[in-house]
């Protein structure tokens, strides 16, 4: 089990219920609307948040036809667990809770087989609606009704993911042949049960059951305790639309993030990229993942730039409710430009960069006692690497226009092989998107051919000073130690033309220290095509 925190001072309304419980529910709904529980909570410097990593009950054969009644019976099992977690969270004073992507209905559906699992969802911008108190206003809204009543009983904001449908006319641009749009949707319910916001996932990954909206949703909602939140889903996290545009333009300082993420080491473990986003953008990320360890799916967290609480456990069959006290105004780590660039040791080659490649002084290159360069596949990309030997030293490796430097010191030699890798190019497996990466990571064994294998345990404790001359401003800092444990970077930001990560005093063996840059303008993908690696198993 992995439940960790690192801090640097830093009602069911529609599905059958016993008469007594129904009476309690109706009292809670009315009391919330009439204000029996008092006014809005006073604004404080911190708020209490929760995420729930849920092990969903799944369809035995999601591609097989089913009825609405059968679909509701399965989803009710998952909603029962959600309701239990809301009750537990309310006892802890939680003000907002986030549930995972696919947690209610599951996955691996066809467009036809998912239809009985879909709720109708009107636009919150056009319709004011409280599903719990107005259950008969729209047909096929049983899931929304239960979620709305949970929010009322828990007196909290509730963010959940479900499948939704929206009828369309054949003359409407993009209207599918079956006459309706089907969306992977995150909904936000307020503490009085009202439908506050919806977000329809933009970056689908071979999700044949769903449509992508014609234009990306840029969704925010306001809370009295923490101000503005943004919402997006799963691998949206790696793309300009909607993630960067939303965080750049909306003023949101907190993110509600449902996900169904398959861990991919060394650079894209779930909690790793969640924390990377929080640090890179100076925001709080409330990330809820599904818990299916057999499929490599675990890893949820509550991340601020200086603080993370997380859950990652590939051994336990159980999910976990994670709560944390979160700063209302997250304090960022990244330093602003400019600062003097890092100094290179005497004898290291001096390089100049043009638009296409890096040119180094030949005499200096020959004079430097550089380790040999080799290549290996790291998460399907052809990285250029150098081995990292000795107790301490400086190594450098280049790929394309990117040069990566590492100064390192380790507490003791452990016999483990580490490599510093650089990649500057188009990722082309299961999607096309552009990455620049500088990464120090542990290899799978003593041979160079093991570099890039997935490794979760490590013994070597490093002090790390890593930097690279990235071409764009969007760089995710990644720092992962043994057991897929998070460590915050000590210092981070631009120094001259280099983006720099420094970290000393790690408490456990290093798995990965990396700077993962994205050049969105070079993605070169066409609308309707996947633009990210698979967050799910094949066929999902």
Image (tube, helix red, strand yellow):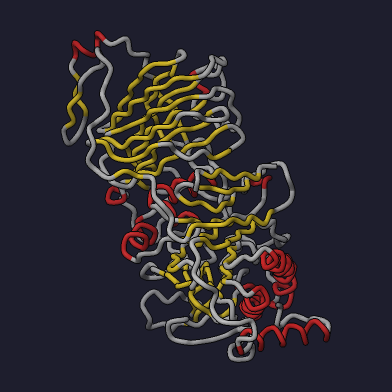
**168 left or right of 467 in image:** right
Q: Is residue 356 visible in the rendered structure shown here?
A: yes
Residue 309 screen position, x and y as percent: 58, 49
Q: Is residue 63 visible in the rendered structure shown here?
A: no
**401 left or right of 540 in image:** left
- Above or below, 134 against 102 in this view is below
Residue 281 screen position, x and y as percent: 38, 52
Q: How many marks?
A: 0
**Quick one: quadrant of the C terminus?**
bottom right
Q: Residue at x 68, y 54 (%)?
A: 320
Residue 364 screen position, x and y as percent: 21, 12
Q: Residue at x 42, y 77 (%)?
A: 175
**362 left or right of 88 in image:** left
- Above or below, 30 against 395 in this view is below
Q: Residue at x 42, y 16 (%)?
A: 392
**Quick one: quadrant of the N terminus?**
top right
As rendered, which of 272 and 322 lies closer to the eye? 322
Q: Residue at x 38, y 35 (%)?
A: 501
- Above or below, 191 against 62 in this view is below
Residue 468 screen position, x and y as percent: 31, 32
- Above or below, 58 against 118 in this view is above
Residue 249 position by quadrant: bottom left
């Amino acid at each position: 089990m992995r439940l960790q925190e690192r801090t640097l001072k830093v009602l069911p309304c529609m599905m059958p219920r016993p008469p007594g419980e129904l009476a309690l529910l109706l009292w809670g709904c009315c009391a919330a609307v009439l204000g029996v529980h008092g006014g809005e909570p006073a604004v404080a410097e911190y708020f209490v948040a929760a995420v729930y990593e849920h092990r969903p009950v799944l369809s035995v054969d999601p591609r097989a036809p089913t009825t609405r009644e059968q679909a509701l019976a399965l989803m009710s099992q998952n909603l029962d667990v959600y309701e239990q977690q809301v009750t537990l969270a309310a006892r802890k004073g939680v003000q907002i809770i986030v549930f995972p992507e696919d947690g209610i209905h599951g996955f691996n559906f066809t467009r036809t087989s998912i239809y009985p699992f879909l709720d109708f969802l009107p636009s919150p911008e056009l319709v004011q609606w409280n599903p719990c108190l107005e259950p008969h206003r729209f047909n096929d809204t049983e899931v929304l009704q239960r979620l709305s009543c949970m929010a009322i009983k828990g007196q909290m904001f509730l963010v959940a993911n479900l499948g939704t449908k929206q009828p369309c006319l054949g003359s409407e641009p993009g209207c599918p042949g079956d006459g309706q749009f089907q969306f992977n949707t995150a909904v936000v319910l307020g503490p009085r049960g009202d439908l506050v916001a919806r977000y329809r996932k933009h970056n689908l990954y071979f999700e044949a059951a769903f449509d992508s909206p014609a234009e990306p949703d840029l969704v925010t909602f306001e809370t009295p305790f923490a101000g503005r939140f943004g919402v997006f889903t799963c691998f949206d996290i790696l793309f300009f639309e909607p993630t960067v545009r939303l965080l750049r333009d909306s003023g949101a300082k907190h993110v509600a993030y449902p996900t169904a993420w398959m861990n991919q080491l060394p650079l894209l473990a779930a909690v790793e990229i969640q924390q990377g986003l929080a640090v890179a953008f100076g925001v709080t990320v409330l990330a809820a993942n599904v818990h299916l360890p057999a499929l490599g799916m675990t890893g949820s967290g509550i991340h601020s730039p200086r603080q993370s609480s997380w859950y990652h456990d590939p051994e336990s069959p159980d999910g976990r409710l994670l709560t944390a006290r979160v700063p209302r105004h997250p304090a960022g780590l990244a330093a602003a430009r400019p600062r003097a660039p890092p100094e290179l040791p005497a004898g290291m080659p001096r390089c100049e960069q043009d638009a296409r490649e890096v040119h180094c002084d030949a005499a200096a290159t020959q004079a430097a006692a550089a380790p040999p360069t080799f290549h290996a596949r790291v998460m399907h990309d052809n990285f250029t690497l150098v081995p990292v030997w000795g107790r301490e030293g400086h190594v450098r490796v280049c790929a394309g226009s990117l040069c990566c430097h590492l100064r390192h010191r380790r507490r003791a030699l452990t016999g483990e092989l580490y490599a510093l890798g650089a990649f500057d190019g188009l990722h082309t497996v299961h999607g096309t998107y552009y990455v620049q990466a500088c990464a120090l990571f542990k290899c799978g064994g003593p041979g160079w051919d093991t570099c890039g294998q997935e490794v979760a345990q490590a013994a070597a404790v490093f002090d790390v000073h890593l930097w690279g001359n990235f071409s764009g401003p969007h760089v995710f800092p990644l720092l992962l130690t043994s057991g897929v444990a998070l460590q915050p970077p000590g210092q981070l930001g631009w120094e001259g033309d280099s983006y720099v990560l420094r970290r000393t005093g790690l408490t456990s063996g290093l798995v990965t220290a990396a700077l993962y840059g994205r050049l969105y303008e070079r993605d070169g993908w066409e609308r309707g095509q996947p633009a990210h690696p698979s967050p799910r198993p094949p066929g999902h």
